[in-house]
């Protein structure tokens, strides 16, 4: 049987947790199967935790802490992971994002974080993470808004965004918040380094029905792709797969309305939200 892979705890909090858990289990003289039976959970779950691929639920983690006599260390580490504003699966992407000189995004459900207003971001994060406290949400909002600094650089990256029409039609936070958010999108689209297109409902089915897609380009490194769902993401670095995702984006780009026509529809949506806000000021 091959020796277990030695994790580098500096790569992520999940890897740190996995290394700590494995150390405690070995010290306790337990196999993964035996530890899993004591919880009880499948021993394969223990393996995933120790590989840094998953983090246990709060309840399971509390049992692990007791069984392995961790004296609260696993509980403290788990709480730290939960409170981290940018999760491990997104951290590497954020590092890449800061180095990119061009970003092409298709957003299936929301305005991209780089263009979100504070109130819109707060509502998106609050609804997407209903288990978080108000303090935790504010930490996440601050982290998201902080990323927007890269668009204010002396030489900001190119940002080309294709928004699904649902993004401007779904009233996140209500009409006042949406009108403010769409105004920021239009202001951003007027900058020389930012383009915004709308993919209308009339375009029908398309190549990215599974979710949002981002392509990052660099001055002296290969492109990468990032696939994002509600609470998970996948960073794609394999060149052949990145090329396939780039082709999908090109198809979306071809189906989307030109920037000028997109701006017209966004302004119309703003006017509709303005009417709603006047009719119902609450």
Image (spheres, rainbow, N blue to C red):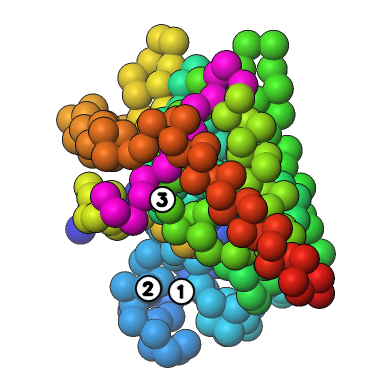
Report, in whole angstroms, how far the alpha carbon at label 3 lies from the one at label 1: 54 Å
Q: What stretch is highlighted in magenta?
A: 191-203
Q: Where is residue 200 in the image (x, y as percent from the top left)?
A: 36, 50
Whether tag 3 and tag 1 are in contact, CB under 8 A, the answer is no
Which of the 4 image quadrants contains residue 157? Answer: top right
What residue is pinned by disc 3? 164
User: In the rendered view of the protein, which quadrant contains the C terminus?
Assistant: bottom right
Q: Is residue 151 left or right of residue 52?
A: right
Report, in whole angstroms, how far the alpha carbon at label 2 lies from the one at label 1: 18 Å
Between circles 2 and 3, the one closer to the viewer is 3
| Residue lying at 63% horizontally and 11% vertically, measured from the top left | 155
| Residue lying at 51% horizontally and 60% vertically, measured from the top left | 169
Q: In this view, does 166 lie to the left or right of 175?
A: left
Badge 3 crowding class, 10 Å Cα cut-off, few under 14, some 14 to 19, many 20 or more, is many
| Pointer 3 or 1: first along the chain | 1
User: In the rendered view of the protein, which quadrant contains the N terminus?
Assistant: bottom left
Report, in whole angstroms, how far the alpha carbon at label 2 lies from the one at label 3: 37 Å
What residue is pinned by disc 2? 45
Q: Give yes or no for residue 200 being in the magenta stretch.
A: yes
> Quick check: can you spot residue 161?
no
Q: Is residue 83 left or right of residue 228?
A: right
Tell me the tag on residue 29: 1
- Residue 264 drawn above or below residue 272: above
Q: Give yes or no for residue 270 being in the magenta stretch.
A: no
């Amino acid at each position: 049987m091959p020796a277990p892979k030695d994790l580098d705890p500096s790569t992520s909090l999940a890897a740190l947790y996995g290394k700590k858990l494995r150390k405690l289990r070995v010290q306790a003289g337990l196999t993964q199967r035996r530890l899993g039976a004591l919880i009880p959970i499948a021993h394969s779950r223990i393996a995933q935790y120790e590989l840094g691929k998953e983090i246990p639920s709060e309840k399971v983690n509390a049992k692990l802490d007791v069984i392995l006599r961790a004296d609260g260390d696993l509980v403290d580490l788990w709480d730290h992971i939960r409170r981290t504003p940018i999760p491990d699966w997104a951290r590497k992407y954020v590092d890449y994002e800061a180095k990119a000189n061009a970003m092409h995004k298709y957003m299936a459900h929301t305005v991209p974080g780089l263009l979100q207003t504070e109130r819109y971001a707060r509502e998106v994060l609050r609804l997407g993470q209903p288990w978080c406290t108000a303090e935790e949400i504010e930490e996440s909002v601050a982290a998201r808004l902080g990323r927007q600094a890269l668009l204010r650089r002396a030489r900001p990256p190119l940002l080309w965004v294709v928004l699904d029409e649902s993004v401007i039609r779904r009233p996140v936070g209500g009409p006042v918040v949406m009108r403010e958010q769409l105004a920021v999108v239009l202001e951003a689209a007027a900058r020389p380094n930012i383009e915004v297109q709308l993919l209308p409902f009339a375009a029908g089915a398309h190549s990215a029905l599974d979710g949002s897609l981002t392509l990052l380009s660099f001055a002296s490194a290969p492109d990468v792709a990032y696939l994002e769902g509600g609470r998970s993401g996948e960073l794609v670095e394999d060149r052949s797969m990145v090329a396939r995702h780039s082709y999908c984006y090109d198809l979306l780009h071809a189906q989307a309305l030109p920037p000028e026509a997109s701006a017209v529809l966004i302004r119309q949506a703003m006017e509709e939200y303005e009417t709603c806000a006047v009719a119902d000021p609450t």
